[in-house]
Amino acid sequence: QVQLVESGGGLVQPGGSLRLSCAPSGNILSITAVGWYRQAPGKQRELVAHISYGGSTNYADSVRGRFTISKDNAKNTAYLKMNNLKPEDTAVYYCNADLLAWSSADSGTYWGQGTQVTVSS
């Protein structure tokens, strides 16, 4: 069974950094387009950053210049490097990825389980 597994969240002080990772489990050929989303308490889930199959990136205005999305095709892993974190970045962060699997039945778009990022002094 294919799943997306996220890691790297935690508690960090304002101005600090974290790197989130997103990797699929199962028989996956490649991870193509990836989006990182976040949802703060009482707010809607929002797109933070996106990287296309070809490597083009887009960012929310609130994180541009501080966050960097990337993917390692050899490792089938996507990352979100977050620098200069602010209290308003506190949220559960979710990975959403298009996966190409050996089995066509397993290919498709998946969500990770979410990882908590808390920015507080």
Image (cartoon, grey):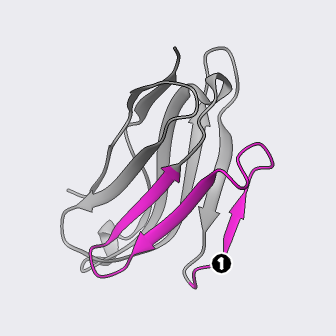
Quarter of the image where one finds residue 2: bottom left
**Residue 42 higher or lower than 17, as above or below:** above
From the viewer's perspective, tell me whether residue 88 is left or right of residue 19. right
Amino acid bearing label 1: Ser
- The residue singled out by tag 1 in the image is 56
Observer-nearest of 26 and 43: 43
Residue under the point 57% across and 59% down: 68
Residue pictured at 20% horizontal, 56% vertical: 1
Question: Where in the figure is residue 49, as x and y percent of width and height?
Answer: 64, 55
Q: Measuring from the top left, give residue 38's x and y in whole percent.
A: 58, 37
Q: Is residue 60 magenta?
A: yes
Specify start and end residues of the magenta stretch as a single range.
54-81
- Label 1 sits on a secondary structure element that is loop
> At x 53% / y 17%, what residue is drawn?
120
Q: Nearer the viewer, residue 18 or 111?
A: 18
Q: Is residue 55 above or below residue 36?
A: below
Vertical arrangement, residue 69 with respect to residue 91, above or below: below
Magenta region includes residue 76:
yes
Q: Say left or right for 108 vs 7.
A: right
Q: Would you place residue 36 above or below residue 25 in this image?
A: above
Q: Which image quadrant for residue 28?
A: bottom left
